[in-house]
Amino acid sequence: MALPAHITTKNLSGRFTMNKELTPAEPLDKILGLQGIGWLKRKAIAIGTITLTFKHYKDDGGVEHFDIDNHLTGGIPGSREERPVDGAERKRSDMHFGPQLFYTKRRTPGDKQGLSEFSSKGWTEDTLEDGLIETQIRADTKGAGWRELHTWGIQEINGERRFVRNIDFEGPKKEHIQIVMYFDYLGA
């Protein structure tokens, strides 16, 4: 289902499921493999459904937050992400991806410093006005690890507004993969 007009990067609360028809499977499988996810689990993810439940709010101190519950069908346990939108790097551990360092920040209008063409194109006017969401996740390892730079926002695809994640991935041996993940809106 397309996003209603009131869902913007300033109000992303709701449920979303990855659209498998629009999201290419092969690059996603390659990324998961480079992150150490085994073949069997990758196949289960490919067959299953990924659903994200977003709670988007500001705390008492005025700091913006995304609390995201990731649900996977097929018996694969999901995970919870708690992301303050303040640009501070934090540690977390994930049952699938291991120890990680991450930050999340809002890219204000006109702030394109450091954004690649891939990360900065295709966004709706309201996304550009309200600001993109940028989050970087990297393996917390002493040796070579992987890194994902996500840019989140709203794009219009085939005449419908959709929540989108542009992901610029770098693997442990400097492999470079870019993927756009498209999501359907399931409601509040």
Image (tube, rainbow, N blue to C red):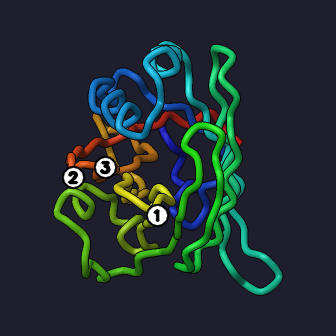
Residue 172, label in figure? 3
Within 10 Å of disc 1 (Cα), the crowding (few <14, some 14-19, many 20+) is: many
Q: Position of residue 175 (x, y in %)?
A: 21, 46
| Residue pointed to by mark 1 | 135
Callout 2, which amino acid? Lys
Seen in the picture, residue 77 relative to 99 is either above or below; the reply is above
Q: Residue at point 52% right, 20% down?
A: 41
The answer to whether residue 179 shows anywhere in this view is yes
Do residues under tags 3 and 2 come within 8 Å of each other at their CB atoms?
Answer: yes
The local secondary structure at tag 1 comes to strand
Q: Nearer the viewer, mark 1 or mark 3?
A: 3
Seen in the picture, residue 155 relative to 182 is either above or below; the reply is below
Callout 3, which amino acid? Pro
The local secondary structure at tag 3 comes to loop
The answer for how far apart the CA atoms under marks 1 and 2 are is 19 Å
Seen in the picture, residue 144 relative to 15 is either above or below; the reply is below
Callout 1, which amino acid? Thr
Q: Residue at point 52% right, 70% down?
A: 103
| Residue pointed to by mark 2 | 174
Q: Residue at point 40% right, 38% down?
A: 182
Q: Position of residue 176 (x, y in %)?
A: 20, 48
The answer to whether residue 15 shows anywhere in this view is no
Within 10 Å of disc 3 (Cα), the crowding (few <14, some 14-19, many 20+) is: some
The answer for how far apart the CA atoms under marks 1 and 3 are is 19 Å
| Position of residue 123 in the picture relative to residue 71 (left or right) | left
